[in-house]
Image (cartoon, rainbow, N blue to C red):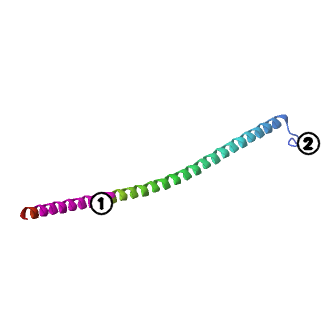
Amino acid sequence: MFSGRAFTSEKDIEELAKLKEQVEELQLKLREKDELLKSAENSRDQMNIVNAKLDEMKHQVSEKDYSLKYAQQQLSDAKVLIYRHIGITLTLEIYDFAILSFYSIIT
């Protein structure tokens, strides 16, 4: 006696073919999703690299800004010293002129 399971019916063959096709479609979708995931991970990694470079550039700009402000302060201090020196020099010249004028008057 033959079992009903021993022979596969045409309906079962069609159902197996559909299931196989569905499995292949799902595998294709899974590969596509894996590729998208890898692409997203690569994009994330690239963004992390760009952000790290941006942070480094911000740090460099901050250092240069500090150096510039320090140089500007030194320039301002130097100008004050120069103006003081000019003022002292002019004061001394005025005193010298006054003394010379005084001596020329009394002599």
Q: Tell me the quadrant of the picture where the N terminus can be found.
A: top right
Magenta span main SS: helix
Q: Which of the numbered marks, if any, corresponds to residue 77?
A: 1
Please count the marks in the image: 2
Q: In this view, does 55 lie to the left or right of 16?
A: left
Which residue corresponds to the image point at 21% horizontal and 62% vertical from the top-left? 88
Q: Which of the numbered marks, if any, corresponds to residue 2?
A: 2
Q: Does the magenta stretch include residue 93?
A: yes
Which residue corresponds to the image point at 68% horizontal and 42% vertical from the top-left? 32
Taking depth in this image into account, of 91 and 7 the one nearest to the observer is 91
Looking at the rendered structure, the secondary structure element under dot 1 is helix
Cα distance in 3D space between marks 1 and 2: 110 Å
**Residue 72 percent across, percent down from the top left:** 34, 56
Looking at the image, is mark 1 or mark 2 earlier in the sequence? 2
Q: Which of the numbered marks, if any, corresponds to residue 68?
A: none
Q: In this view, does 8 lie to the left or right of 65?
A: right
Q: Is residue 74 left or right of residue 41?
A: left
* View extreme (left): residue: 106
Q: Does the magenta stretch include residue 61?
A: no
Q: What residue type is labelled 2?
A: Phe
Which residue corresponds to the image point at 63% horizontal and 46% vertical from the top-left? 39
Q: Tell me the quadrant of the picture where the C terminus can be found.
A: bottom left
* View extreme (front): residue: 107
Q: What residue type is labelled 1?
A: Asp
Q: What stretch is highlighted in magenta?
A: 75-101
Q: In which quarter of the image is residue 27?
A: top right
Mark 1 or 2: the one toward you: 1
**Residue 103 percent across, percent down from the top left:** 10, 64
